[in-house]
Amino acid sequence: QKEVEQNSGPLSVPEGAIASLNCTYSDRGSQSFFWYRQYSGKSPELIMSIYSNGDKEDGRFTAQLNKASQYVSLLIRDSQPSDSATYLCACDMRFGAGTRLTVKP
Amino acid sequence: GAGVSQSPSNKVTEKGKDVELRCDPISGHTALYWYRQSLGQGLEFLIYFQGNSAPDKSGLPSDRFSAERTGGSVSTLTIQRTQQEDSAVYLCASSLGQAVNSPLHFGNGTRLTVT
């Protein structure tokens, strides 16, 4: 069974803070890793993709991958209220249950 | 260009009836996926198509669920003898290449309610 686990939420941070979202996966053969954002009542949309060990930065978002530890994370710097959503970690085509993030003004 | 299109957007059916959900992927996308999302839950993988074949259909919950894809394009997910626990949002996604290495583009989903 290929499983993707995300840290339990909900997560609440003040505006301007760093939000840290974590994910582990069971299939050591996984090749591609994605973070999607899902607003309430909407479909998931891609935020970041990462394929190799290390960090990948895109604006306020940084994805981190450690294949040895089977661990993926997403950091959101200078969090904004508009970042409030559920964040879904995906490994290849399997998704975690999501972590709900609330950024308080 | 147009995104992933799903129809109907909402479907209410009686327990025991069959339903068909349709997905029209982005033109040129060879891979197509079906997921189910119950209220407040994550995405449950159902099936993946590459072209017209389904290399991975391990997520189909029971033999009441089936899916097909024709012409490397449109896909239909069929649920026979619907049950109340089938109520969920069914999401379709497509990607440009193989399942790995290609991000998914999602449709708006079909909200299925079984009464």
Image (cartoon, grey):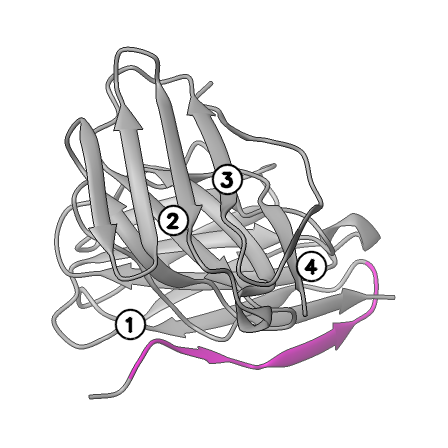
Per the rendering, the mark at residue B74 is none
Same-chain status of marks 1 and 4: yes
The residue that mark 2 highlights is A35
**Both labels 3 and 4 in a single chain:** no
> Is residue A35 found left or right of B10 in the rendered image?
left
Residues at marks 3 and 1, CA–CA distance in whole angstroms: 30 Å
Residue topped by disc 1: B25
Asked if badge 2 and badge 4 are on a common chain, one would say: no
Label 4 marks a residue whose chain is: B
To which residue does mark 3 refer? A21
Subunit of label 1: B
Residue with the most extreme bottom position = B1
Q: CA distance from mark 2 to mark 4?
A: 22 Å
Q: Going by the picture, which residue comes out furthest to the top? A: A68
Tag 3 and tag 1, C-beta contact below 8 Å:
no
Mark 2 is on which residue type? Answer: Trp
Q: Position of residue B11 (x, y in %)?
A: 69, 77
Q: Earlier in the sequence, mark 2 or mark 3?
A: 3
Q: CB of mark 2 within 8 Å of CB of mark 4?
A: no
Q: Is residue B74 left or right of residue B35?
A: left
Horizontally, residue A44 falls left or right of residue A47, namely right
Magenta extent: B3-15
Residue at the spot 50% in from the left edge and 80% down from the top edge: B7
Residue B100: name its quadrant.
top left
